[in-house]
Image (cartoon, coloured by chain):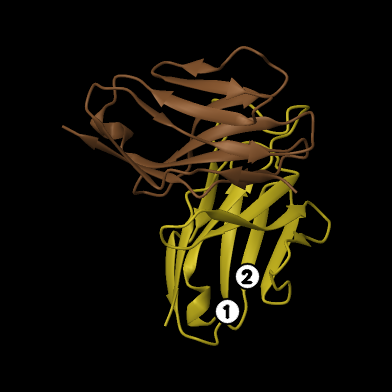
Amino acid sequence: AQTVTQSQPEMSVQEAETVTLSCTYDTSESDYYLFWYKQPPSRQMILVIRQEAYKQQNATENRFSVNFQKAAKSFSLKISDSQLGDAAMYFCAYGGSQGNLIFGKGTKLSVKP
Amino acid sequence: GAVVSQHPSWVICKSGTSVKIECRSLDFQATTMFWYRQFPKQSLMLMATSNEGSKATYEQGVEKDKFLINHASLTLSTLTVTSAHPEDSSFYICRAGASGTDPFGDPYEQYFGPGTRLTVT
């Protein structure tokens, strides 16, 4: 069975600074997807970034980028130039080839002005 | 773009009654719907996966007779919590499966519903 581990329950960053959220996963599948989702207080799940396992190049989306280390099964999220609106719960998720999603426990990110 | 709605957004019911939550894909056909439950300050836990016209597949530990899932059409799936108890109070979220070859669809589309907050008194 696949598992996703987020070892940082809470993180804090100063506005305009950079923060990295950690995520590790375990799987025996060779074809899969990895995601970072943001859940603000409204609780709407918002996709931040996704990575296909077969792609060696790390995904980037504006201020968000990932460090995907397939051999180490690591998938960290870097948020650059942090903004107050980035404050939220962040969930790392594993996506299987059947479309199922397995979530980590989440990291609560606070942004200090 | 892809939009998924849920109704109601919040509901309060008395213990012992049943509650139905609707999940609709507004502008695309969702052959698969995923239902999640999220307790306060916790992660999303998959409850069941439903395919249109078929019986739902429930995750281990989820009572299929208590959480009835119907996926009668490509745009509507319902979750009915039967004989609700206070411990069923939670946030329920649906996610529509994307059509096409990519199981997660267009990354710029939204496939999660906004969620339903259920409180059982």
Task: Pick out the residue farthest to the bottom.
Answer: B16
Res A16 → quadrant:
top left
Quick check: do tags 1 and 2 share a chain? yes
Quick one: label 1 or label 2, which is nearer the N terminus? 1
* Image vertical order of residue B55 relative to residue B111, above or below: below
Question: In this rendering, does residue B70 appear at all?
Answer: yes
Q: Residue at x 28, y 33 (%)?
A: A85
Instruction: Look at the image and give the colour of chain B.
Output: yellow
- The residue carrying mark 1 is B18
Q: Residues within 10 Å of mark 1 (few under 14, many from 20)?
A: some
Position of residue B22 measured from the top left corner of the image (x, y, whole percent): 58, 59
Q: Which residue is mark 2?
A: B80
What shade does chain A have? brown
Between A63 and B74, which is closer to the camera in this rendering? Answer: A63
In this picture, residue B95 sits left or right of residue A80: right
Residue B112 or residue A98, whichever sits in front: A98
The reply to whether callout 1 and callout 2 are in contact (CB within 8 Å) is yes
Residue B62 placement, left or right of B56: left
Q: Nearer the viewer, residue A55 or B103?
A: A55
Residue drawn at x 26%, y 27% as measured from the top left: A83
Mark 2 lies on a secondary structure that is: strand
Residue in the picture at 29% in, 19% down: A81
